[in-house]
Amino acid sequence: MICAVYKSRLKPDSYLFVEKRNDFERVPEPLMKMFGTPELVMLLPLNKREQLALADIEKVKVELAEKGYYLQLPPPPVNLLEEYKKEIGYSRD
């Protein structure tokens, strides 16, 4: 299975995987508006990979088959202050 991966010009670090290059027919219109004009990043042979950097490859395959697309959003930002407080055992209680 080869899919096309596009990045968003409006949403940093957001990627849209579709079954075929330039085929956005199954992607909902509101999502396309939010995503903006897609910019092709690569054609990706999923069957030759065991994993992806930030997405579960099996989930990507299932969503491509069922929905025709997979949207990869960036991970939420880490609050370093909160992480440090947890590390040192700080609590307001």
Image (cartoon, helix red, strand yellow):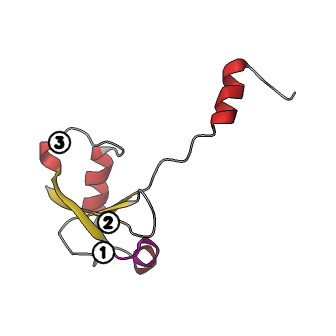
**Cα–Cα span, label 1 and label 3:** 24 Å
Residue shown at 44% from the left, 70% from the top? 10
Query: Percent x, y for residue 58?
Result: 28, 45
Q: Which residues are magenta?
A: 32-37
Q: Where on the picture, by quarter, is residue 4?
A: bottom left
Q: Where on the picture, by quarter, is residue 35?
A: bottom left
Give the mark nearer the N terminus: 2 vs 1: 1
81, above or below 31, in the image? above
**Residue 60 forms part of the magenta stretch:** no
Principal SS element in the magenta part?
A: helix
Q: Where on the picture, by quarter, is residue 93?
A: top right
**Residue 34 forms part of the magenta stretch:** yes
Assign a secondary structure to mark 2.
Answer: helix
Query: Percent x, y for residue 6?
Result: 29, 64
Q: Which residue is mark 1?
A: 26
Name the amino acid type tagged 1: Arg
Q: Which residue is mark 2?
A: 67
Query: Percent x, y for residue 37?
Result: 35, 76
Residue shown at 25% from the left, 53% from the top? 61
Assign a secondary structure to mark 1.
Answer: loop
Nearest to the observer: residue 80 or residue 34: 80
Give the mark nearer the N terminus: 1 vs 3: 1
Assign a secondary structure to mark 3.
Answer: loop
Bin the neighbour count of mark 3 within 10 Å (Cα to Cα): few under 14, some 14-19, many 20 and up. Answer: few
36, above or below 6, in the image? below
Bin the neighbour count of mark 2 within 10 Å (Cα to Cα): few under 14, some 14-19, many 20 and up. Answer: some
Disc number placed over residue 90 in the picture, else none: none
Q: Which residue is mark 3?
A: 49
In the picture provided, is 45 more to the left or to the right than 88?
Answer: left
Residue shown at 58% from the left, 40% from the top? 78
In contact (CB < 8 Å): disc 2 and disc 1:
yes
Give the mark nearer the N terminus: 2 vs 3: 3
